[in-house]
Structures are given as structure tokens and as C-alpha cells.
């Protein structure tokens, strides 16, 4: 079980632009089917609807003993009173970072919720990520009407396009002011959310009435207090298909080795889950679990043994695994400021080739890097439904005047998480948890360490 | 939010065959990666690892005030001490009821976990559900080795085959005795689980050392204290594809109506979720929400209006919806004793045809019943991973000597649920919850009641 | 081998509106890559580019002996001289009959070829089949621009919608006159093509300058002189998936019978091909091959034997098979005037149930009718490419002033076939040809006749 | 139209081991359904069933004028008399070269045809291509029974595994002798077929009674007198999906370029067809059509213009395109002796990056190499049916004592082609044919030459 000790009550508090005084146009549900509600509106969320961060009995008892309230997050959902007048408001949506299945679903859901449920008909899309705010690039903004977004969920990618660059917070807020944006929905990963925090601070400094609502987008599934991120399950599904290809290639040639590099800069969730889904993987290398290459306990000898025993092997390597082997190469950054990972996949392929070459043993290594094929898929059904909820809850949160927060699923409930809590630490695979145990069991892979 | 009031502490207590005294062969994990554990084995579950049933702050505070412990379920997972000696044990697996994606994944996972992790090499499969226990049918049992189950997850259905019949508990327990079964893994729905309860009681009566572990199988997703059942997500995915077909047919003809009947005898989860995934449905009819056909607020007039406005319509009807319209027909039961539902799909098709015929208006109704196409699919990746965990946890529970229980996922944690708690009530779509609200929003369907 | 004796030279002659005098805007290709052409334009088709109807040596020698020229069809493709002035012309596209994968691909291809290659920017779509010509229905025509059709091939169905009705030829030609249509591209089956012939005759009578170009659309693949029709391969692919479902259901229950009804009113191509693709079918029933139900050689006894031997069976029945068993029911017609087939699928299901009921034997029959699911799919890649060529060749033919003809693929070449040749006979499965032999071999099904 | 001038009558003659004298166990079909045959067995192929190589009227008339017989190939199919006694025969199957969808389908079809139709129950598989014949590798042969091959068509690759090496013909024939093989079915490409020819000659030299039947396997579709090779359509289907990913990535970033390298060492069929299927490609580079990189007519300037106009571009490059740009690098060969192509994909990516870097313009190039993902897929339905026929006809040909030939589809008929005719020239994309014209039209790509 992860340790949540670092979180404080303050970290769970959501900021607002002011107190909501306008009656929500969301239909009040008091009666439905066989039951009659005691309270006027049973579908609205109130401020004491909160979700405890940890549903273990231990945590409960601990709080009990110490006489302290458990930490909890605000529940997402429609509020009876909202902050913004739907008739006067203008909203913007921006998508930043790499592609991820479901981006169009989230865009579509926000637009339709704002339009049909709140009556907001002034929504624009910012093209090419935060770059779209910067005048020098001259990208025109995009009108987002229900017609425009009606079928976009059937296609991968984002109709707004994206970019990875870092841009001056002041220029972005200038643009927000000029465009008169009241709610900015920002769909992006760790870097994008940190950018959103800075935008929030600049907005506060200038005293603007603009809400910043994040929807966490990380195909790596590595943002804290986010049970799963949209697109992740679709990515696992498509990654598992590629692992099947790697397996077919591996068994199809003498000493065949199928090696697949999967997404996962700091967290190996995709590699681990895809291995579990495909059931045909022998080695899973993830950033969280260091491995030796050389030596009796290292990967090369383990691979040798596997080939001797079975004649083929399948290796999955997350892009952030084994970075220490690349440390002698100079470090570079991508336009978003993310440290550019050196390519562990081609490095390993080369090392394995060299190893068996030196032994004068024929191997047939087939290396597959499916990153763009996976990122560009449309969301599967489960992700599509999930994106629908994320977009709806983002619209609810924005209309209620919440800000500097993101929409999350946590232990099966949609919640509001302050951006600062989400970016404080990175979510990683728990090396004594169910998932990794199951990976070790199903692959049968050894520790891959000379001195464990 | 569902009401959990009916559950008592007793309902959450798991029965055992005796105290586990044998050291588990599951590898003890004390150290891994960057962290060093304080306790000897960090991957074992202890008896005070329990999951609180309700993670709302309200429930927490309520318990707090009343000074009572919260209700909780035992966490699933490997125990440090087990009850059965792996070398002496014999296990059996049975699958009963209708097909559901993932059956083979669960079988595979149980067999591999028992074989590779616990060293149990005596596992058999009972063919054709409980019928396979009854001597008169003469079905031979099936040896379940790792080789036999290696690729079965790639195919839909169940390699053990299934059946729906009810059979004498005594005869079943006679067979268990004769076969010398120590753990029976029973994969089935409501009826199968009730049967398992009776088998448990008969076993207790006879003083046998046989554990009964259930894995809930319901494509309808309608078992209580089970957050989601395996195969359900795959079913939604395939159902959503069929809804897309219905939409294409609807827009392709003058006054085109695409109507799809989906699984859901008492609970409309598949219909509601598939509608959310496809985003092209106009009417969703589920058992939980009664609807009128005739009258100004009824379905027929609503459909008329929709056709006048848009020229086409898509209707999804769960098989258990609108049963009151079929009440004049005589009631029948299937071999499992389930009440046979009269066919609401063909009834509605006929009623709609008649309605527009009387108006002398051309319609083109295309009716699709994809039930078997959906049930027979292999599990998608997410379900496949899920099935893997269910099977592993079932093996852990059985080896630990637990009995009369089932494996469940609850608020993101795998737990043990006593069968009696699971079958006490049926899980249904919450008509004031997120999902149904979202269905109403995305379809725009009216209440379909003359006097709401 | 089919007998082609009925075809005369006159049947292969293509009619034209007049002699083409305008230089084609299609780019002339004289040189490319390594070769240099001897003639000015190597990509244009001339009038002596003709495709012999029969590529057997026997046919060749027969002609040789008799000193007669072999029968041949005009090759499709761009002509150096065209009949219509691209700047002054107006074209229309209509889709009629049931849905079929690839309709949108054909529409898209015609529009893009006319626009980008010939410079025709005045193309309209007639909505809802020939019904769209009839004023009383008030359907507005649809502008077909490159933007409008850009992505339509990704969705099933037809953006123009379709209908099955028969409408007065005079009214249709009135509309063509009023709309000033010079080329009508009509995408439809047997009935639609016969309608096109009548339209052609009425046009001729009135002395209009309007070309009628057909693109044969028949998911049943049953039009003569058409090697394969678009959408057919996609249909087989999806049908084969359904057969896999039927097989999974069949093996999953005691005496399980999976029965699937497939398209095929008069020709069993889909049933036969899908059975070959799935390799899990035991009985294939098609209109071309009569079968007995009762008696020692009939289907019921054969099914009994199969169940006794293997415990399950898969049956595929084309919708037009076994019509004689339904002959006592009154005959009806659909709006297009096609004789409505009585439902052989439900009839057989009922007969089989009754048969085993009388024997007091439990069976589990799962009946699947996937028609709309298959018809509504988008084209697969091969069909999509094929549709692209059909549309391009249709545009070439129309611009060259050809009329009363359709575009076809014949022995691997695109050709022009007079409509009357195509509708003279129906293409059927050759009962001594490769395909049916292979079906008999792979199913192992007996003749199913009491007195063969 | 391709030129066939180089073919002589001798090139079309099939060699045989001797005259067939044994009655075929293939069932004689004389009567079926409504027709009664005039001849005893209507399903058998006779020696004057031949398929003319060219079905153009021009070729016909040319032969007519010159008074010469047209060139033709022997028709494939069952013969009334066969050469081998099914009870005494032993057959072997070998798969060589890279993976290709449908390999398992062909294996399955040969085995089942031999077993069920001819009664041959002694069929073995040679593992790892021709390497499996060489004793030093110690690979055990594989028994191929109906049970073993029953479901193999559902998985990609080949259950026999493959290899690319060249091995001594003498050693291979030694093994054939030792194993007592009467028919060797060899499934492979150009190199494998040339190897088969050498094996045939060695067999002849030694006077052995062993038939060599080839089934052409080339995912590139580049073997002469083979209308299409199995797996090619499946490859196009999967390649088209990857092109869609490339398009999504291209439009998703500022100046996005999606570049995909596809199979096609000497022939660009896959690249061209996939581009036609996806409809979203702007540049198609194939080996048959040389292109300039630099200069006003070159690719780099054309790409610049495209990005300026539309902001994104999709490029498809066949692996054998533009090899002259790599000519300064040393030439290497793979184990089969094929010249190893230098990687044009990474070369182009690097050149494009450098070009825009020098202009100081941001581009986002996403390079995808899906080769192994495509090769490892199972066959789609159409290919699966096709493979079934290829395998059946291979069995017929082998049993009839034919040798040194391969099974082919030509203008819609299955035929026998002498290996030497097939390997004499390579099939390539016709640069003035329909397919390439259509690619040029749909991409709008310029000639990419400075001096055309």
C-alpha cells in the first residue's frame, strides 16, 4: 500500500473564485422510479460530500485513536448554486503534451455539458497547446459548437492539436484577458498542470475572474491522487496487441527475441499491465525496479538461460527503465522542458546483439517501438465513458467557481484534487503491491540483480 | 449513493475450515528497489487488512459519532500461513450459467496460480456446469494442466462448457466426495452462487474438508458488493459497436429506427453504459426505470416527435425493461429456475410498427438482438487483467481455507465477500447517480411517464 | 465453370450519347521512371482495349476453330477525348436498396475524381434513393463537395441515405430535367439497375443529354458479369466473426447448436465464403442447393448424428435457402417490389427444437441474425480500395458520354457492362466449382437429400 | 499493361514425376442440385483445362493473325488419376523467410486436404525453414495431424517457425532421402523458391521420387505470374491503420510530419495500396519510381510547400525506395543472401530534420516502422479463404505428381506455374497502370524530379 503520510489537510482544500449565488440550470431530481426523495434535489453534491483518501480499516482506526478527522477530497458533481452566469461566460479548452486516446472525448464532453446543460454557447479551443496563446505564432482560435464536436470522439488525437513547448505565463494570461476567458479547461500532464498552476497564480495576482480546471492527461498513468488517467486502458489494450506480435515473431525464428519499448518515463504501469494482459512476456523492465545487465544475476545471463530452455523470449522495456546505462551520454530536454530520455530500447537491442555475437550464437531480435501507433488511437469504450464523466465534472467544477484543481477518480469516486497535491509526487508502480507481484509471477522473471 | 443500511457486521465475516498452520510457498518480499521494509514480508495480507465498505466522509463521521467501528470486508491476497498442504490437495473448477467474456481467463489464472505459486498439480475441470457432477450425464472430468490452459484466454466461452440446470445438492456433494475435491472454485452468477451456498451447507453437514470459493460471473454486472464483474466492460464495448450499427441503419433510411435489445434482466448497466459509450442513442429503457408506452408522455409519442424533428431514432432496451407490458402472457422458467423474460424487444418492435401503421406513416425499423455475439467474445485487455487477479485471489483464499465466500473488487481493492451478503440484494442502476444522470443528459430523453 | 452461351455480341456493346470531342483534362502520361513510351499517352484507354469474357484456352480454341471473334467487354478507364464539358456539367449520385459496406467510399471517389481530375464542381446527392426525386416527399438535395465527403469513408452506411421503394420513372426523369442533371450515378442492386434502365429509356424518348452510369451494389455478390461486388468481402469478414461466436456458443453448452442466418436471397456466396473463412461450420444451407429436412438423408437426422458424435454443431443458412418449406405462407413484397422472403432462420430453429423435443433430448440452440450489424460496417481496406477504383472508372465512363452501363471487375480488369447483360441472369454459386467443393470438404456435410 | 513478351511456351510447361495411374479418392461429382452433368465427373480438371495468360482482345487477335496458340498455364485442381498412393506416401511442409499473415492457414489447409480428402496421414513439418533439414542444428521434426493444426489459423506467424539462412542443397536432399519424403511443400519467397529449384535438380540427379510444390509467400506481392500473394491484403489492411496513426500524429502537432516505412524491397505494392486505402497520404515513395531529394522539384521543397499550405504531411516510404541515397554505405547481406537494404526511413527522417533545422523551422516528425506488427498478424478472412485454396491446390498438384512448380492465382483462376517462370523476373508496380495513377491522383504528389 502506498504511503500517504505527506498529505496535509491543507493539501486537500479546493480554492474558489467566490461564493456561488446563481441557481444552477442543472435539472433538480427529486423523484425517480419507485423511490421518493426526502430532500429537494438528490442529484446535487454538497460541500460535505467528501471522499476519504484511504478506505482501509487501519486508517480509520488510526484516525479514531488520534481523534482526528480523516483526510478527504471534495466530491465532484453538479452544485445547486453556481458561480458563473451561463449567459455571460466564455470558456476555453486547451490540450497540451503528447497525444493520448480520449482527448477528443474530453473536449466533446466539456462542450456538450456546457452547451446543453448549462446553456453556455461561447466555448473556444486554443490550438496547439499553450503555443496557441502566443500571438507570434498566429494560430487562430477554434469555435467549439455541438456540431463541431459531434463525431470527434471517433478519431484519435485532438482536434485542437497540441504542442510540448514552454511559454511565458504572462503572455498566456495576457491572451486569456484579451480573449475574455472565464474558465480555462487545461488537458495535459505533469508539465501542463504545473504551467496551469503558474497561470492560476498570475491570474490571482492580476485579480482576474478566471477559473483554471485541469483534466489530468498522462498515458503513463503517473499522476498522484489519480486512480487511473484517461487513455491508459486503451494504451494497455493496444500495447498488449503489440506484445502478441512480439511473441509471434519470437517463436517464429531460431533464438527469436521479441523486444518492445513501451511508454513510461518514470512509471512502468503500461509495461506491467500490458504484460499481464498478454501473458506471453518473459522480462518486464520498468523505471521503478533497477536491473543489472552483466553478471550472473543480470539480464543477459537470464536471457541466455531462457533461450537455452525455450528457444525464444519476449522482453518489454518501459522507456524510462535502465536510464543509468545511458548516463554517459549528454542530457537533453524536449520543448516542454522534460528531460529527453535516451533510448533504452535501441541501447538494449545493441547490447544483446553484441553479447550473443561475442558468444557466436545466432539470435533473431525483432525490436518494436509502437509509441505513436498507441498514442494516436481513439479511446476504447471504457475510456470513452470515463472521458465523458471527466468532462462533465470539469464543467460542473468550473461553473461552480472552483479553480487551481483537477478532476480525478479516486477509489471509484470522482473528486476534486488541488493541482499542488497532484504534482507533489509522481505515482509509481508499488513494488510490493498486487500488480508487480502478479507480473513477477506471470513472467517468472528473476530479480535481475547480482546482489539483491 | 446506494443505501448500505441492511448490512450487518455478521454479514461481512468470512468462514474458514480451520486455522491455517502451513507456511505459504508464496515468496516473501521484504526488500525491493529503493525501499527497505520494516516487516519481514510486505506482500502478505493479515487479518486486520480490511476495506471499509463506504469511503464517504459522512459514513466516517457517523461511525465516529456513534462510537462504532465501520463495517469492512476482509482484504484478498496471499496469507503467510495456509490451511491446505499443496502436495495433498485436489481442486476443481466449474463454470455455470450463460457465457461471459473472461471465463477462460479466470480458469487459466486459477490453474496457473495453483500450479506455479502453490505447487498444486491436481486440478480438474467439471464439464457443463453443475450437470458435470451428475453421474447420469456421463460427462468425463477434464485435467487442467498449465499446458492445457496456456492459450485458452484468446478464445471466448469456456473450455469447461456450461449449463443452466438445477441439480440436487446431495448428488453434487456426493461427486465432490467421490472425486476427493478439497477446493471447489465455482464461477457463476446469482443462481450458481446460491447453489454454492447450499453445497457449502451440505458439506458442513457431512463434516467434509472442502472449501467453496465463488468468482462472481454476471455479464449484467448486478451482484451486490461487487464493484464490477468480469466481462462486463468487454460486453459494453461490443454492445457500443452494435449501437453504432443501429445508428448507421437508422440514419440510412426514411424514418429509420434502430432498436437494440441488450442484456440486463434486472439491472440496466450494460444498456446505460453502452449508450454512454456510443453517444448516438435517443432512448434507453432499463428495468429500474418504468416507462409508459401510450399517452402524451409515453414512448410512442416521444418517438413520433423525435422522428418529426430528426428523421431517425436509436432505441436501446434492456431485456428486463417494461416487463409489465408482457404480463398477460404466461410465466415460464429456464432450466436454472430463472424466470424466463418475455421478449420486450420484439414486443416493442411490433407495437411501434402498429403505431405508425395506424398513422399511415412509413417507418424503417431495424431490430438487432446481439446477445450471443457479445457473450461469446474473448475478454478485452482490461477484463483479462482483472480476471487474472480474480483467479489469483481465489487461489489464495482457497489455500488459506476460507469458504462460502466470493472474490470481489470493492472501491479499488480486492476483497472477500460472504456469499450470503452478495446474494441478499441485487445491484441496480442508481436513478439519481452519476451514470443515469449522464444517460439522461446525453440522450435528452424525457421521463416517458404520463404522471411523473 | 459457368456457361456463358446466352451472351451475344450485341449484349456487350456500350451505348454512348454521342462522339466525344473534348480533350480530357486527365494528365497524359508519356514517360515515367525507367521506360519511355512509344505513344503519346500511355494511360488512356482506347476503344480496342477490350477484355475477353472467358480466359480459358478452350474458349480461345473454340473461337479459333469457328473463325469467330471472342466476346469481350470494353475496358474501363480514362479516354483521351470526353463528351461533356467539365465546366458546364451537373452530376448527381443516388444510393438505393439496403446498406452495404463501401457506399460512402464510392460516393467519395466519384466526387473527388470529378472535382480534382475533371474540374467538375457541381455534384449533388439525391437523398433516400429514388424517393429523393419525388417532389411529394420534399427531401432537399445535398451538395457534394470535397470537404463534405472527405472523411465519409470511415463510417458505415451512406451519407445520402437510401430507400427501397419503386417510383414512377416519369417523375424521376422530370426531376432529372428540372435539376439539369447530365450524369446520374446510380449505386444499387438488381432492382435499382432495372430502374436505371427504365430511366435510360425515358431519357432517350425525351431526347435528353443525360448519361446513366451504374455501380453495382449487392452485398449478396449476385450480379452477372461482376466478378465481385463492393462490400462483399467486408461482409464475409464480419460474417465469419459471427460464425466464430456461434461456434463458441455451440461448444459452450450440452448439445449446443449455433445457427446463423446470413444474407443471400438467391445466391449463397456470403454463407459459403464465411464458412470457408471460419472453418468451424458443419452445415451450410444455400438457395442453390436444395436440402431435405425429414427422412434418413435429411438435415434433422444429420444434425442428430453430428450431436451424438461431437456434442455440438454450427449451421449457417442463407436467407434464401429452403424457401419451399415456407411455401404455404402467403407471399408478400417489400417496397422495392422484391418478394419478401419468409424467415427460414426462425423456421429452422423452430423445426429443430420440435424435433429434439419429440425425442425428449435437451438441446441448446442459439440463433443469431447479424444482418444489420454486417450491412452497417465501413468497408475494410480491400473493399475501400476497390470502391475507389469503381468510383474513378464511373467518373471516366460518365465524362466520356457512355450510358446505360455499369462498372465491373471481370477477371482482374475493370470493364463496362451494359445493364441489360448484368440483369439478364443472376450470378449463383457453381455447385461443381472450387468454392462449393471446398465448402463440402471443410464442413464434411452430406448431400442432405433422401434421393440424390 | 505489363509486357509478357519474354515468356515462351516452354516456360509454361509443368514437369511431372511420371504418369498418374491411381484413381483419385476425391469424390466424383456428377449431379448436383438442379443440373445433371453430361460427363462422369464435373469437378475434375483435365490437361486441356488451361488459362490463357492475357485476357485482352488484342492478345487474342494477335495470336489469331499469327495463327499461333496463345500461351497458357495449366489449371490447378483435383485430377481423376493421381501419381502417389495415399497409403504409402510421406509429405513434409517447410516455411522459410520472414513472417507473413496466412502461413498457418496454408499449413492447415495442406494437412487437412491430405488427411481428409486423400487419406494421407503421414505429414511432418520441418522446423525453422531449410535449417530444419540440417542435422547439426538438431531441430526435431513436427508431426502434423488434423488435431495439431485445427486452430492454428487463429494465430499469426508459423507453427513450424522459419529462418532466413542458405543451406547446402545436398544436405537438404540427404535429409529428404533419410526422412523418405515424397512431396515437399515449400512455402516461401523468391529465395526460397530458387532454393526449391536447386533441390528439384538435385532430386532429379539422384533419381528420387520426390515432388517439390511451392506456395509463393511474399508479403511484398512481388512474384511474377502471381496475381496476388497470400497475406498481402492483410498487410495492406494493417498498414493502412498505421497510416491513420501517422495522420493523427501529423495533424496533432505544429508542422507535424507522420512518416511510415512499409515493406517493399523491390516493389511498392504495399505502400501504394495502403496509401489508397487510407486516403490521408501526401507522398508515396516506392522503389519503382525514382525521386530527387534536393532541388526545386525534390521531396524537401515539396514537403516545405505542403507544410506551408496545410500545416502537416504524411509520407509513406517503401523500404526499397531511394536506395541510391544510401549507396556510399557498404553493402551487406542477410543470412538468406538477400542484399540488406540500408534504412531509407531513418535516413529520410534525419535528412528532413536537418533541412528544417537549417531553415530554423520547428517541425514534429513522428517516424513509425510497423514491419513486425504487420508481419505477425493472423490472416484476415479473405486471405484465410485464399490460403485455404492454395493449400488444397498444392495437395492436388503434389498428389498428381507435378513438381518444380508453384500454385498461383492468375486472372481469377488457380493455376500451376513452373518455378523458373515465377523467379525469372520480379513483379513491380506498373507506373502507367491504374494503381499508380490512382496513387498520384489521391495524393496529389508531384513527380519529385528536377528534370522529368
Image (cartoon, coloured by chain):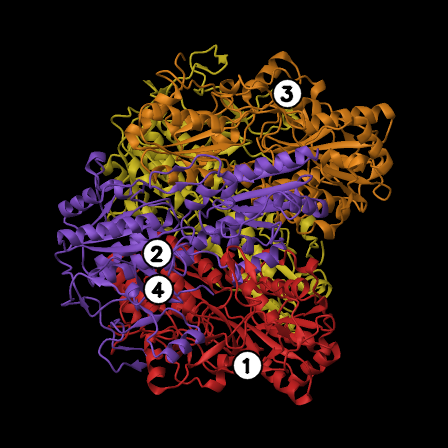
Chain colours: A purple, B red, C yellow, D orange
Query: What is the residue that sits farthest to the top in this orientation?
Result: C38
Query: Toward the viewer: D70 or B15?
Result: B15
Residue where numbered disc 3 is placed: C64
Image mark 4: chain: A
Mark 2 secondary-structure assignment: helix
Mark 4 secondary-structure assignment: loop
State whether residue D192 appears in this view: yes
Given contact means CB atoms under 8 Å apart, are the residues at marks 3 and 2 in contact? Answer: no
Residue C165 against residue D358 in the figure, above or below: below
Mark 3 secondary-structure assignment: helix
Q: Residue C324 occupies which quadrant of the picture?
A: bottom right
- Name the mark nearer the viewer: 4 or 3: 4
Q: Residue at x 29, y 38 (%)?
A: C147
Residue D341 against residue B156 in the figure, above or below: above
Q: Residues within 10 Å of mark 3 (few under 14, many from 20)?
A: some
Position of D66 with respect to D355 (left or right) is right
Residue where numbered disc 1 is placed: B14
Mark 1 secondary-structure assignment: loop
- The numbered mark at residue A7 is 4
Q: Residues within 10 Å of mark 1 (few under 14, many from 20)?
A: some
Q: Residues within 10 Å of mark 2 (few under 14, many from 20)?
A: some
- Name the mark nearer the viewer: 1 or 2: 2
Residue where numbered disc 2 is placed: A424
Q: Residues within 10 Å of mark 4 (few under 14, many from 20)?
A: few
Amino acid at each position: 500500500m502506498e504511503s500517504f503520510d505527506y498529505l496535509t489537510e491543507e493539501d486537500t482544500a479546493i480554492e474558489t473564485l467566490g461564493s456561488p449565488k446563481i441557481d444552477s440550470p442543472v435539472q433538480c431530481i427529486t423523484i425517480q422510479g419507485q423511490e421518493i426523495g426526502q430532500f429537494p434535489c438528490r442529484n446535487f453534491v454538497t460541500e460535505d460530500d467528501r471522499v476519504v483518501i484511504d478506505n482501509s480499516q487501519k486508517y480509520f482506526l488510526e484516525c479514531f485513536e488520534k481523534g482526528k478527522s480523516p483526510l478527504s477530497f471534495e466530491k465532484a458533481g453538479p452544485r445547486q448554486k453556481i458561480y458563473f452566469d451561463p449567459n455571460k461566460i466564455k470558456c476555453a479548452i486547451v490540450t497540451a503534451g503528447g497525444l493520448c486516446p480520449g482527448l477528443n472525448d474530453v473536449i466533446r464532453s466539456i462542450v456538450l455539458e456546457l452547451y446543453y446543460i448549462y446553456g453556455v454557447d461561447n466555448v473556444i479551443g486554443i490550438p496547439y497547446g499553450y503555443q496557441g496563446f502566443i500571438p507570434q505564432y498566429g494560430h487562430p482560435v477554434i469555435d467549439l459548437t455541438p456540431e463541431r464536436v459531434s463525431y470527434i470522439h471517433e478519431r484519435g488525437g485532438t482536434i485542437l492539436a497540441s504542442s510540448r513547448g514552454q511559454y511565458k505565463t504572462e503572455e498566456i494570461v495576457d491572451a486569456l484577458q484579451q480573449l475574455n476567458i472565464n474558465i480555462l479547461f487545461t488537458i495535459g500532464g505533469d508539465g501542463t498542470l504545473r504551467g496551469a498552476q503558474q497561470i492560476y497564480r498570475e491570474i490571482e495576482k492580476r485579480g482576474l475572474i478566471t477559473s483554471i480546471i485541469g483534466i489530468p492527461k498522462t498515458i503513463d498513468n503517473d499522476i498522484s491522487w489519480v486512480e487511473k488517467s484517461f487513455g491508459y486502458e486503451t494504451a494497455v489494450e493496444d500495447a498488449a496487441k503489440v506484445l502478441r506480435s512480439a511473441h509471434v515473431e519470437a517463436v517464429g525464428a531460431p533464438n527469436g527475441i521479441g523486444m518492445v519499448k513501451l511508454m513510461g518515463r518514470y512509471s512502468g504501469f503500461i509495461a506491467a499491465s500490458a504484460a499481464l494482459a498478454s501473458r506471453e512476456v518473459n522480462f518486464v523492465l520498468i523505471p521503478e525496479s533497477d536491473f543489472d545487465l552483466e553478471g550472473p544475476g543480470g539480464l543477459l545471463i537470464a536471457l541466455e538461460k531462457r533461450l537455452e530452455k525455450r528457444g525464444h523470449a519476449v522482453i518489454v522495456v518501459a522507456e524510462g527503465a535502465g536510464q543509468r546505462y545511458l548516463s554517459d551520454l549528454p542530457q537533453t530536454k524536449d520543448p516542454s522542458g522534460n528531460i529527453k530520455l535516451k533510448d533504452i530500447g535501441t541501447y538494449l537491442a545493441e547490447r544483446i546483439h553484441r553479447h550473443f555475437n561475442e558468444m557466436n550464437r545466432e539470435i533473431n531480435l525483432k525490436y518494436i517501438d509502437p509509441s505513436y501507433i498507441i498514442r494516436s488511437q481513439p479511446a476504447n469504450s471504457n475510456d470513452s465513458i470515463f472521458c465523458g464523466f471527466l468532462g462533465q465534472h470539469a464543467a460542473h467544477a468550473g461553473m461552480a467557481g472552483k479553480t487551481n484543481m483537477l478532476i480525478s477518480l479516486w477509489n471509484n469516486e470522482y473528486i476534486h484534487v488541488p493541482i499542488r497535491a497532484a504534482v507533489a509526487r509522481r505515482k509509481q508502480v508499488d513494488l510490493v503491491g498486487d500488480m508487480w507481484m502478479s507480473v513477477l509471477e506471470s513472467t517468472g522473471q528473476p530479480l535481475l540483480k547480482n546482489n539483491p
